[in-house]
Image: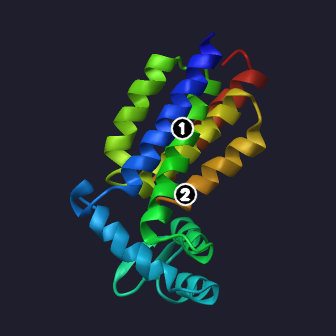
Amino acid sequence: MNNIYSRVFSAIIVIFSIYSFLNASIDYSYDYSVYMYYTESAFLLDISYLNRSVVSYLPFPYVLVPPYATFEYGYVALTMFLGYLGLSVQAAYAAIGTASIAARAVVMDKAKAGVIFNFLITVCYITLFEANAIRVGVASSVCLFALLFLQKERYVAAMAFAALSFLFHVQSAIYVFTFLMGMGIYIGTLTRPYL
């Protein structure tokens, strides 16, 4: 029965987020217009620029997006890819935000968080992250996948997702550091139960 609620909840969230992102106006959120402007700028970049700018301008994982903003490599690459697919700026933002929200809902469901808790977390995250700071939203969704894999004791996948989160927002490096410490302590207690 819970599975039916989860699927209905996920469908409602996806429909709501696509609708709200595609119908957003400039006053949608504090950073929305900035993201629209720089997403359009990223659409004009090519792969060679993306790779050169990491080396030439700033330390990894930032990329300079003209005229003067820096964004993480993974976010710029994803945005460029969506532009190559022919999506509009607003549709690319909607795709990234909706994918992040849907991924978070799936992870919460797989972690057996419960439909009500999943709903509350999703509403909170939509307003805090995808609407205002989409890169942090994507990074946190990727981090949740790392936690899910850690829970299932799939350590390589957990590490891969933890590292991937760093490509979408540099502040997730704090998470990756604490994740590595926690994983080391967790694995250490499995091998040395007397600790």
In the picture of the structure, the residue carrying the numbered disc 2 is 166
Residue at the location (39% across, 86% down)?
Answer: 66
Residue at the location (75% across, 30% down)?
Answer: 153
Question: Which one is in front in this view, the residue at disc 1 or the one at disc 2?
Answer: 1
How far from the left and from the top, in percent, is residue 74?
57, 66
How far from the left and from the top, in percent, is residue 108?
56, 28
The quadrant the C terminus occupies is top right
Residue at the location (63% across, 40% down)?
Answer: 146
Q: Amino acid at mark 1?
A: Arg
- Specify the quadrant of the image occupied by residue 8: top right
Residue at the location (70% across, 51% down)?
Answer: 160
Residue 29 visible in the shown view: no
Marking on residue 104: 1
Q: From the viewer's perspective, is residue 85 above or below residue 8?
A: below
Taking the image as shown, residue 134 lies to the left or right of residue 32, namely: right
Q: From the viewer's perspective, is residue 99 above or below residue 90?
A: above
Secondary structure of the residue carrying tag 2 is helix
The quadrant the N terminus occupies is top right
Label 1, label 2: how far apart the Cα atoms are: 17 Å
How far from the left and from the top, in percent, is residue 177?
54, 47
Taking the image as shown, residue 81 lies to the left or right of residue 93, namely: right
> Looking at the image, which is closer to me, 113 or 53?
113
Taking the image as shown, residue 152 lies to the left or right of residue 102, namely: right
Task: Mark 1: give few (<14), some (14-19) or many (20+) Cα within 10 Å.
Answer: many
> Looking at the image, which is closer to me, 157 or 1?
1
Secondary structure of the residue carrying tag 1 is helix
